[in-house]
Image (cartoon, rainbow, N blue to C red):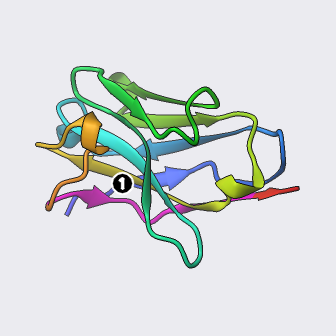
Amino acid sequence: QAQLVESGGGSVQAGGSLRLSCAAPGYIFSSYCMGWFRQAPGKEREGVAAIGSSGAIRYADSVRGRFTISRVNAKNTLYLQMNSLKPEDTAMYYCAASQFGSSGAYCLTSNNYWGQGTQVTVSA
C-alpha cells in the first residue's frame, strides 16, 4: 500500500491562507492522477481539486478562484494553496492518488491510495 503523507493543516482566521502538501512515493507520483478531498463532521466527503498526469485540472465550484492545486514531479509532492479561507472550508483534508482516474472525477476510482488527512480549521 503506497503511503501518501499530508501536511500543512492548521487553524487560521477567515481570510487567511494555508498550503497543504502531499508527499507520495516517486513510483506512483508522476503518472498518477492526484486529488484533494475534504470531509467535515456530519458531511459526506467531497472532491476539492484534482490534477491529472497530463496536467488537466478540476476545481469544485466552492473553491474555484481561492484554491490552487499544483504538483512538482521532481519532489513527488502535490500542493493545495488555499487563500481567502472561509469557516465553511473547515474539514479534514485528504490527498488521493489513482493510476486510472481522471481529474474530471477528482481522480476517484475503486482503487485509490489515500493519505491519513490533515485538519484545517477556519474561525470566523
Give the SS element for disc 1.
loop
Q: Nearer the viewer, residue 76 or 120?
A: 120
Q: Identify the residue at horizontal 64%, vertical 31% (top origin).
A: 66
Q: Position of residue 21 (x, y in %)?
A: 52, 42
Q: Identify the residue at horizontal 33%, vertical 45% (top origin).
A: 24
Q: Position of residue 14 (x, y in %)?
A: 84, 47
Using a 10 Å C-alpha cutoff, classify the residue at mark 1 as few (fewer than 14 neighbours), some (14 to 19) or many (20 or more): many
The magenta stretch spans which residues?
111-121
Which of the 4 image quadrants contains residue 101?
A: top left
Which of the 4 image quadrants contains residue 113?
A: bottom left
The residue to which callout 1 is attached is: 4
3 relative to 16 in the view: left or right? left
Q: Quadrant of the N terminus?
A: bottom left
37 relative to 68 in the view: left or right? left
Q: Is residue 44 above or below residue 5?
A: below
Q: Position of residue 88 (x, y in %)?
A: 69, 56
Q: Nearer the viewer, residue 11 or 76?
A: 11
> Which amino acid is tagged 1?
Leu
Q: In the displayed orientation, state which residue is furthest to the front.
A: 61
Q: How many marks?
A: 1
Q: Is residue 68 above or below residue 41?
A: above
